[in-house]
Image: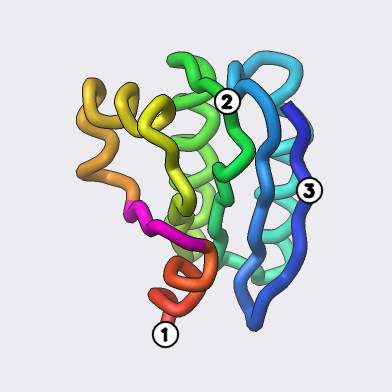
Amino acid sequence: MKCTSKIIKDVMVVDIEGDIMGGVESEQFQTLIYNAVEQDTVKIVINMANANWINSSGLGMLISGMTTARSSDGDLKLANVSERIRRPLEITRLDTIFSIYSSVDEAVESFK
């Protein structure tokens, strides 16, 4: 898994590429989230357009990021979720917890 980030308006957009499997690979993701929150960037969108797969550890990683953002009066939203990624979210009912948008622009605009 590879993570890169950029700021659009006052929202940090994290682009994830590859398999979201948690573990050691999730450290970069967690560091991005913690650093953003420390700098008062608490509006976060995870762009999953290039994510291939997610397992339970990857789901835990997303939950941890959302919890971190929400504990600082922010939120973490998902964008461009493929059917392959959406299915585990639905099975675990996490699709009722995360706000899911069809595009990064739509997710960014939802923070208004």
Q: Quadrant of the N terminus?
A: top right
Structural distance between the alpha carbons of marks 3 and 2: 16 Å
In-front residue for pair 92/60: 92
Q: Earlier in the sequence, mark 1 or mark 2?
A: 2
Task: Give the residue at mark 3.
Answer: 4
Task: Give the residue at mark 2.
Answer: 52
Quick check: marks 3 and 2 in contact, CB under 8 Å? no
Q: Three-letter amino acid code at disc 1?
A: Lys
User: Which mark is nearer the camera, 1 or 2?
Assistant: 2
Q: Earlier in the sequence, mark 1 or mark 3?
A: 3
Q: Position of residue 23 (x, y in %)?
A: 66, 14
Whether the magenta-drawn stretch holds residue 20 is answered as: no
The magenta span reads 99-103
Residue 89 lies in what quarter of the image?
top left
Badge 3 crowding class, 10 Å Cα cut-off, few under 14, some 14 to 19, many 20 or more, is few
Q: Position of residue 66 (x, y in %)?
A: 46, 47
User: Going by the image, does 47 lie left or right of 83?
Assistant: right
Badge 1 crowding class, 10 Å Cα cut-off, few under 14, some 14 to 19, many 20 or more, is few
Whether the magenta-drawn stretch holds residue 100 is answered as: yes
